[in-house]
Image (cartoon, rainbow, N blue to C red):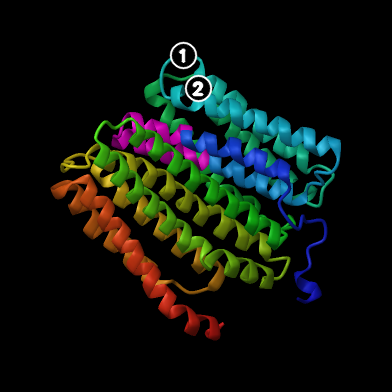
Amino acid sequence: MTDETAVPGAAESVRPLELFFDLVFVFTITQVASILTTAPTLLSLGRVAVLLVIIWWMYSGYAWLTNALDLDQTGPRLLLLTGTAGFFLMSMAVPKATGPGPWALIFGASYLLVVTVHLLGFLGTSGHRGIMRIGPLNLASALVVLAAGAVPPHTRLWLWALAAAMEGLTPLVAGAGEFAVGAGHFVERHGLAVIIVLGESITEVGAATSRENHVTTSIVGALLALVLSAEMWWLYFGREERDSEARLERVPADRRPRVAVYSFGYAYYVIILGIAVAAVGMEKAIDEFHQPSHHLPGLLLPLGISLYLLGLACFHRTLAGDWPLARLVAALAATALVAPAALWSSGATALTTAALVLLALIVWESHQAPSSASGE
């Protein structure tokens, strides 16, 4: 590695306190997904997509923050724990934030706390100049989220969508070039988020199947969901994570923040959304294990799998510079094959078809891996 890629002031690996923070974050994602589980409608899907932008924006922001923080000191530890408390309050408020009552205000106030801690945490670090550009825009979007708690529930989504749009445009408006990005820590931190979200999805599916009285449905459904989750894990951790670290390290330090925004920010959002929607889709497929589903719940599984594969493809594109065509084809195959299976056959057929699509992709990529590696 040349001196051009060295990043002074950046963490080299994930610390235990960050794992503690990640567990609370994953609980927040689970709570967001519960909105779709309780009411699997297009409106709920829209709420989940918008809320996840808002939540993922600040989770990713904390990954950037801990990349620059010295967590061996008491002050930074207390700051991160305060942000963790804010995320925990958000997670408790999320399922009720779409309805009447004070919960949307609690969600907004907790989010404002998370954003404020994030801004304060960067002061005195290598990213202090960058946060002076992005921090005020983060506070503005947090105030919009807070204001959403004061409007009637049926108009709340529009303000959340405005806040999400503001956050999505922030790196384009303010830039991200004045932050330090240590590749090893950054890749490991985001990879842990994926594996923890996948693990939580398995827990949720397991809890759903344990409530089933039919033995075959419980056992076979749970195993099929486990196979799907394992295949999703394989597609990222089999090779993509390792390669992504090497690719990010090759990016010059001054360009690395921008590349990190596109790969671990935008593309990763699609990956996390895909996992969350797929997890709900697995639950719904088990609910309709022996019969077809003629409603939106039957489409959640193929939608989640397709989003996950699309996110992986975009992630690869931003770091490697080329599109993984096999993953794009598999995303289309998941839509074309799994959706009809769910709508016209049964949840069991849908789960099996999805597992076979991902298996075919894994087998194909394993045969292409040697030539790809030599090409690099």
- Secondary structure of the magenta portion, mostly? helix
**Above/below status of 159 relative to 19:** above
Q: Quadrant of the C terminus?
A: bottom right
Q: Residue furthest top?
A: 101
Which residue, as the protein is rendered here, is positioned at the far front? 215
Whether the residues at callouts 2 and 1 have beta carbons within 8 Å, the answer is yes
How many callouts does the rendering have?
2
Q: Residue at x 45, y 26 (%)?
A: 95
Where residue 301 appears, as percent x and y from the top left, is 31, 48
- Residue type, mark 1 in image: Gly
Rendered position, 81 above or below 219: above
Residue 35 is tagged as none
Rendered image: mark on residue 104 = 2
Q: Is residue 92 visible?
A: yes
Q: Residue at x 65, y 38 (%)?
A: 21
SS for dot 1 = loop
**Please, which residue is most extreme toward the left here?**
344
**Residues rendered magenta in the picture:** 31-54
Numbered disc 2: secondary structure: helix
Any magenta on residue 178?
Answer: no
- Would you name the residue on which mark 1 appears? 101
Which of the image's four quarters has the N terminus? bottom right
Asked where in the image residue 241 lies, by quadrant, the reply is: bottom right
How dense is the environment of label 1, judged by Cα within 10 Å: few (below 14), some, or many (20 and up)? Answer: some
The residue sitting at 33% across, 68% down in the picture is: 360
